[in-house]
Amino acid sequence: MLDDLLNIKLTAQSFVYTLVLNKLVETGKGLKLPANTVVVATGNQKKYSTVAEDIAEPL
């Protein structure tokens, strides 16, 4: 479970995007989560955080 997704810095968002959507742990090395793994990401509305970042629309 990834909590407070909006607080992830822009530099780490590509990792989260790859993990959530493709279940890849490390791009390039092919480390993939098992097929039955469920990745849950949560976040609050941006107005409730003073450190929230803009995130990619698919996230």
Image (cartoon, rainbow, N blue to C red):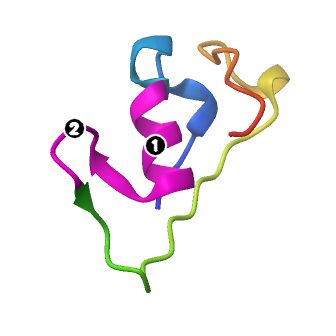
Quarter occupied by residue 11: top left
- Which residue carries the number 2 mark? 28
Q: Does any portion of residue 49 appear in the rendered image? A: yes
- From the top left corner, tell me how far across and down residue 35 is, in percent: 41, 81
Task: Kindly give the residue lying farthest to the bottom in the view shown.
Answer: 36
Q: Nearer the viewer, residue 6 or 59?
A: 59
Q: Nearer the viewer, residue 7 or 25?
A: 25
The magenta span reads 14-30
Q: Is residue 31 above or below residue 51?
A: below
Q: Does any portion of residue 2 appear in the rendered image? A: no
- From the top left corner, tell me how far across and down residue 23 is, in percent: 42, 59
Q: How many marks can you see?
A: 2
Question: Is 43 situated left or right of 19 in this image?
Answer: right
Q: Where residue 57 is drawn, which disc sits there?
A: none
Q: Where residue 18 is drawn, which disc sits there?
A: 1
Q: Residue at x 50, y 13 (%)?
A: 10
Secondary structure, mark 1, is: helix
Question: Is 9 situated left or right of 57 in this image?
Answer: left
